[in-house]
Amino acid sequence: MDITKLDHFAQALIKEAGERIRSAFSYDLVVETKSNANDLVTNIDRETELFFIEKITAQHPTHRIFGEEGMGKPVTFLEGVVWIIDPIDGTMNFVKQHRHFMITIGIFIDGVGKLGYIYDVMRDDLFYAIAGVGAWYNDSPLRKLQPVKLEEAVIGINANWVTPNDKINHEKLISLIRKVRGTRSYGSAAMEIAFVVTGKLDAYLSMRLSPWDIGGGTIIATEVGAVATNLNGEYFDFLNQDTFLIGNPAIHKEILEKYIEQL
Ligand code: 2AM
Ligand code: CA
């Protein structure tokens, strides 16, 4: 497997898909709901996933594709080459704000993350990594994260988790929020991960993410020294939904140990 060639192929596809999405704004968007009224999907999400499946399969017939919209064959194991794809991460941002949505892709070989991409479609900004080689923001190499103190950290979190809920002790999260310098919520897991790997956020957590929300991002994370686990401190399950915490290595453990109590 020529990883450099695969990287160039993936980057070209992502840029082409981004161009298609940007020009699709002039067409009617058809918005539907999925599991609940706030879980949105559009014709563009599905068409973009199909675009990836057709192009990848034409060039690499043995590669398997695990996409959020399930347009490909089901994926139940990670052997061989698997592309984990979210054609649009942050669909609510896409529909309502026309910005702050990402194409994100992780390419895994025999279960090991090799190539990771987060592409901000409207800004034409690409965050990416080649495992063991490095990570980049467009043409600039990303540096290793510098240590940060929790009281100086800015963390990404959805306010929902700080209200009473059946997943996590929200009182403990309130004390985390009082401790840190600030919080942000961007509505796209991939965008929040892109901010963590570039030091614009120091951590991001969520109680429920899917493999395609974080597949690409965790590969970039490894290259800059960010730590990504589930909320038990274990390796995220790339075949199922799981909890998630990514952070600067100086604060990841402290957040898990002092401020997270799952119910
Ligand atoms: P999406 O827009 O691709 O669905 C905040 O909503 C973040 O969580 C987004 O990255 C969103 O991805 C993801 N998300 C929303 N609902 C989800 C669900 N039910 N399971 C997993 N991830 C979800
Ligand atoms: Ca999506």
Image (cartoon, rainbow, N blue to C red):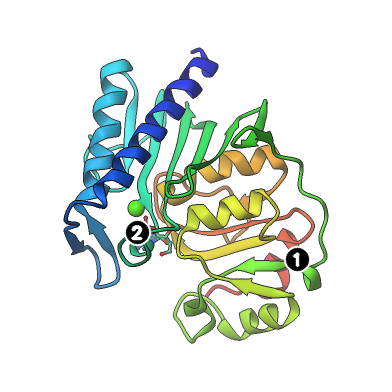
Q: Secondary structure at mark 2?
A: helix
Residue 83 vertical position relative to residue 226 in the rendered view, above or below = above
Q: Is label 2 within 8 A of ligand 1 (CB to nearest ligand atom)? A: yes
Which dot marks residue 90? none
Q: Which residue is mark 1?
A: 254
The residue depicted at 50 percent of the width and 38 percent of the height is 117
Residue 134 vertical position relative to residue 121 in the rendered view, above or below = above
Residue 105 vertical position relative to residue 155 in the rendered view, above or below = above
Q: What whole-number distance in Å separates the C-alpha atoms at marks 2 and 1?
A: 34 Å
Q: Residue furthest front?
A: 26
Residue 26, image x, y percentages: 22, 51
Q: Which residue is mark 2?
A: 94
Cβ atoms under marks 2 and 1 closer than 8 Å = no
Q: Is label 1 within 8 A of ligand 1 (CB to nearest ligand atom)? A: no
Dot 1 alpha-carbon crowd within 10 angstroms: few under 14, some 14 to 19, many 20 or more: few
Instruction: Work out whether residue 234 or residue 45 is closer to the camera in this orientation and state it.
Output: 45
Q: Secondary structure at mark 1?
A: helix
Residue 80 vertical position relative to residue 97 in the rendered view, above or below = above
Dot 2 alpha-carbon crowd within 10 angstroms: few under 14, some 14 to 19, many 20 or more: many
Q: Earlier in the sequence, mark 2 or mark 1?
A: 2
Residue 194, image x, y percentages: 58, 50
In which quadrant of this rendering is ligand 1 seen?
bottom left
Q: Amino acid at mark 1?
A: Glu
Is 2 on the left-hand or right-hand side of 72? Answer: right
Instruction: Work out whether residue 212 or residue 191 is closer to the camera in this orientation and state it.
Output: 191
Q: Amino acid at mark 2?
A: Phe
User: Of discs 2 and 1, which sits in the foreground?
Assistant: 2
The image quarter containing residue 151 is: bottom right
The residue depicted at 49 percent of the width and 13 percent of the height is 1
The residue depicted at 63 percent of the width and 73 percent of the height is 183
